Amino acid sequence: MQMKSQGMPVVSIIVPIYNTELYLRECIESILRQSFMNFEVLLVDDGSTDASGSICEDYAAKDTRIRVFHQDNQGVSSARNLALDHVQGRYVLFLDADDFWYVDTCLETLVNEALRTDADIVRGEYKTVDEQGNDLFARKINRRKMKQAYRLVSSATFLKDIIQGEFFLVLSLIKADKVSQIRFRKGQVFLEDMDFYARLMLQPLKCVFVPCRFYAYRKYAQSASSSLSMKRFEDSFLIIGNLNTYATNANDSILRKTLGEYSVLMYYWGMGAIADFCYANRFLIISRLNLKERQQEVKKLMWKYRVFNRASIFVLLPPIMCIPLMRYRNYIIRLGKHALSKFLL
C-alpha cells in the first residue's frame, strides 16, 4: 500500500460505517487505488456489531493515511460530524461505506479541476450498481448540465442547473473551510444530504461541474417499502419548513426561487411515496403527519414562490384526494405509454 506523503493531506475522505462488512473492503480499496495519493481517510465506525470495526483497524495498521474513530451508534449524521471535527485536508469528500469509486483517477480529476479554477465545490456524476457491484443504470447527463460543464458558476446556478434535485453530497469535492461552520442535523435519518447541501449553497460559492462518472451507488434488491419508516416520512415533510427558511434567508433571487420551489416539490415527492408504498395506511399517515395543515402551508409557499409546475394540482388538492390521484399518476408513469405521462413526470 502507498503511504501518506509528507505534510498535511490535500483531501480528507470521510466514510461513515455501520454494519457494512460485506462491502467495506471494496470501498476502502477503491480509495487506496487512486492515482492521487495525498489524502487522509477518516473511517467512523458508528457502533457496528459486525466485523466493520476490525476491518477499519486492519487498514489503519497498514496505511498511516487512515484514521479510525469509534462511537456508539448515533446515526450517519453524527458519524459525519465527528469526522468533520477532525479533518486536516484542504478539501473534504464523502463516501458511503457500501459504495465505491470505480475510476482510479477520479480523485485526481476532481482535485485538478479544483486547483485549476480555485472552485469551492467540484461535482461529478454517478451510476447505480446492484448488491454484487454489477451495473444497473447511469442517468444521461442532460443539456442543462453539459452547458455548464467545466465553467465556474454561482451557488444559485449550481443548485438550479447542476444539482437538479439530486442532492448527493458524495459527488462533491468541497473546500473544508466552506463546511467548517456547517454540521449535519443530529437525529435526521433521511434527506440529511439535502439539508446540508441547501445550507452550504447559502454561501456565495464558486462551483464547477465535471461530467465524469466515478461514484458507484449500491442499490439494494429489497422493496423500497421496507426502508420507508414513519421517521423517514417525518423528515421528508419537516424539511419543507427548513427549505422555506433557507429560501427566506437567501440573498440571491435565483437561489431563493430554487430553494422555494424545492420546498413545494418535497411535499409533492412525499405524497408520491405515500401513494406508492403506504396507500393502505394513508388515513393514519395523514393524521400522524398533520398533512391537512401541511397542505395549507405548502399551498401558501406555492403562491409565495410562484411555483406553477407539475406539483401545483397535487398541492391544491386536500391529501385525501391528492394521494389517490398520485397513485394513478405513478401508475401512468410506470406504463410510460400514455400521453399524460410526459406531463406528469
Image: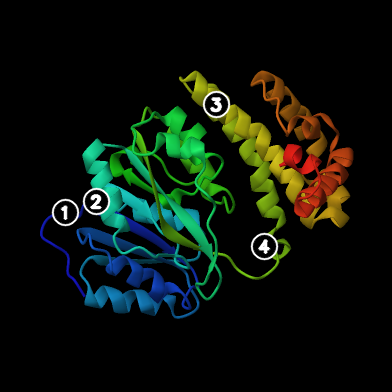
Dot 1 lies on which element? loop
Give the residue at mark 1: 8
Q: Which residue is mark 4?
A: 227
The answer to whether 127 is drawn above or below residue 329 in the figure is below
Residue at screen point 10% across, 60% down: 6
Residue 268 x/y as whole percent: 72, 39
Left or right: where does residue 83 sit relative to residue 305? Answer: left
Q: Amino acid at mark 1?
A: Met
Q: Dots 4 and 2: beta carbons under 8 Å?
A: no
Query: Measured from the top left, where is residue 4 in percent x and y?
Result: 17, 65
Mark 2–mark 1 CB contact (< 8 Å): yes
In three-dimensional space, the C-alpha distance between marks 2 and 3, rounded to whole angstroms, equals 30 Å
Q: Looking at the image, which residue is at 79% across and 35% down?
A: 314
Q: CA distance from mark 4 to mark 1?
A: 40 Å
Q: Does the rendering let one see residue 222? A: yes
Q: Which numbered disc covers residue 247? A: 3
Q: Amino acid at mark 2?
A: Gly
How far apart marks 4 and 3 lie (CA) works out to 30 Å
Which of the two discs, 1 and 3, labels the residue nearer the N terminus? 1
Q: Residue at x 16, y 54 (%)?
A: 8
Callout 4: SS = helix
**10 Å crowding of disc 4: few (<14), some (14-19), many (20+):** few
Using the numbered discs, state the Cα–Cα distance from disc 4 to disc 2 in whole angstroms.
34 Å
Q: Is residue 260 left or right of residue 21?
A: right
